[in-house]
Image (spheres, rainbow, N blue to C red):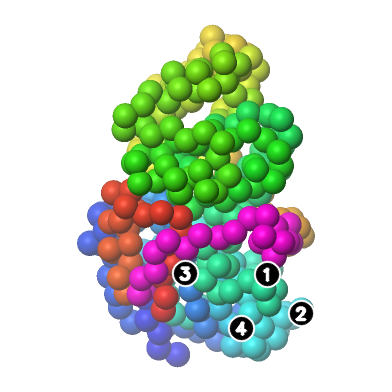
Amino acid sequence: MADMGVVVRAAGGPDALEWTELETPAPAAGEVRMSQRAVGVNFIDTYFRSGLYPWPTTPLVPGAEASGIVEDVGSGVTGLKSGDRVAYTMPLGAYRTRRVVPADRLVKLPEAISYETAASVMLKGLTAQFLLTSCFPVKAGQTVLVHAAAGGVGLLLGQWLKSLGASAIGTVGSVAKVDIAKANGYDHVIQTQSEDFTARVEDITGGGRCDVVYDSVGKDTWRGSLKCLKLRGTFVSFGQSSGPIADFKVMDLATGGSLFASRPMLFDYIKAASELQMRADELFARLASGAVQAHVGQRMALRDAAEAHRALASRRTVGATVLVP
């Protein structure tokens, strides 16, 4: 079955993304073929496109989250049938109109969750879920710093932290994003173009600093993030939008006050189908209750993926970006 999608034949910038015809096979045993309705855009897509992350195959089809409708199921698949609304997150392969997916990587969508919402939260929302519940279980009354607070994960983290009763401090890269972050659960928002976030955190907390810092920026922020932590605080590095962290030494944790550090990856927290389902169930429940709301800030055609990557890299996006096949 002929299909359309976006491929990368050689590592490079956004212009390396090529709209082309693809072939979609019939599903094998344990697989599902789905017609995709919405595809999420994430920094991990740019890491693969640029060659920062190694490629398992060439050419490469980027894309880590999507939603759609089951068209056909392979032998041995139970619990899914033609017509079911489903979503997934996997490191690669989402930038296409149809695809074949292992059945154990799919979750059914509740009626209350739209295709665009699902495509905007399968990676970002599950990331927020495991960061706040498993990587560092945040409790009411704790103080948390989140970088890129107006980004796709950042907006979800702010709302989730509010629902937990934590005190949330967020950083943003422009004045325009301050009010957006404040409207999504952050008690304090620091504009990093004009403010030193380490000094502001010191001031906001009265010198008490933070229990945990969630840092998806990397190179530009990690040193300051460590300075924002209280004694035995935890530094969680889950992205590198400004570039990879360099020159980090284990002794930095000792001199910072017996700190802890983690570099987690979502896919290590959803390897088992049962764990994926458990985390998705909690995410969908919070979305359905209104405690957390997805914010799709940009919608573009799938064939315009290169422009979506340019906007993401230049920090012109707010919340999630969704590509529509």
The magenta-colored residue range is 280-302
Q: Secondary structure at mark 2?
A: loop
Mark closer to the chain start, 4 or 2? 4
Q: Indicate whether 43 appears above or below 187.
A: below
Q: Are marks 1 and 3 in contact (CB under 8 Å)?
A: no
Which of 1 and 140 lies nearest the eye of the viewer? Answer: 140
**Mark 4 lies on residue:** 70
Mark closer to the chain start, 2 or 1? 2
| The C terminus, quarter of image | bottom left
Q: Secondary structure at mark 3?
A: strand
Which of 73 and 185 lies nearest the eye of the viewer? Answer: 185
Task: Kindly identify which numbered label has been placed on residue 78.
Answer: 2
Mark 3 neighbour class, 10 Å CA radius: few under 14, some 14 to 19, many 20 or more:
many
Q: Are marks 3 and 2 in contact (CB under 8 Å)?
A: no
**Mark 3 lies on residue:** 39
Q: Indicate whether 226 appears above or below 151.
A: above
Q: CA distance from mark 1 to mark 3?
A: 15 Å
Mark 1 neighbour class, 10 Å CA radius: few under 14, some 14 to 19, many 20 or more:
many
Task: Kindly identify which numbered label has been placed on residue 107.
Answer: 1
Q: Residue at x 36, y 54 (%)?
A: 317
